[in-house]
Image (cartoon, grey):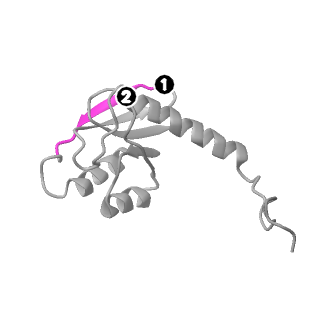
């Protein structure tokens, strides 16, 4: 699994950036080994950085992206490329990657086990 993370610094201990387009760096991380590539955001100081960063990241084909927030155009580009976007900016890239991996493991564990068409137990009988 390949994960893109928009960060304030150039390593896994860096905080996730709040602003998608203006993040100083993005990391492309192997979710299994945590090996990563650092890419300096050349679009951070120009016009329309969110769109340009989203296109650049989509071209790298990660499965997931972690960011603090993203505009509608950037989000559409990533979603159209089949990339799932996760939001978090109050922690390090490494911790956020761990959280995403944990969430994905839970989703897989409970996949297909939802009870549909039944009332939740707290509802009174009709």
Residue 110 x %, y % = 72, 47
**Do the CB atoms of the residues marked 2 and 1 lie less than 8 Å apart?**
no
Which region of the structure is painted magenta? Answer: 33-42
In the foreground, 89 or 58: 89
Q: Which mark is residue 121?
A: none
Q: Which mark is residue 33?
A: 1
In the foreground, 105 or 38: 105
Q: Secondary structure at mark 1?
A: loop
Residue designated by label 2? 36
Residue 120 x %, y % = 78, 61
In which quadrant will I find the C terminus? bottom right
* Residue 35 picture quarter: top left
Asked if residue 43 is among those painted magenta in the image, a careful observer would answer no
Name the outermost residue toward the right: 125
Asked if residue 34 is among those painted magenta in the image, a careful observer would answer yes
Above or below, 54 against 3 in this view is below
- Is 94 on the left or on the right of 24, as rendered? right
The residue at the point 47 percent across, 45 percent down is 63
- Is 109 on the left or on the right of 22, as rendered? right
């Amino acid at each position: 699994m390949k994960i893109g993370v928009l960060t304030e610094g150039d390593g896994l201990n860096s905080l996730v950036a709040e602003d998608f387009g203006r993040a100083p760096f993005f990391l492309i991380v192997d979710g299994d080994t945590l090996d990563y590539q650092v890419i300096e955001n050349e679009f951070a100081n120009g016009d329309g950085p969110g769109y340009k960063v989203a296109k650049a990241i989509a071209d790298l084909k990660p499965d997931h992206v972690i960011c603090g927030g993203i505009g509608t155009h950037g989000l559409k580009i990533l979603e159209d490329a089949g990339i799932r976007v996760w939001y978090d900016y109050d922690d390090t890239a490494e911790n956020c990657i761990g959280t995403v991996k944990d969430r994905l493991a839970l989703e897989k564990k409970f996949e297909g086990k939802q009870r549909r068409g039944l009332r939740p137990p707290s509802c009174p009988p009709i």
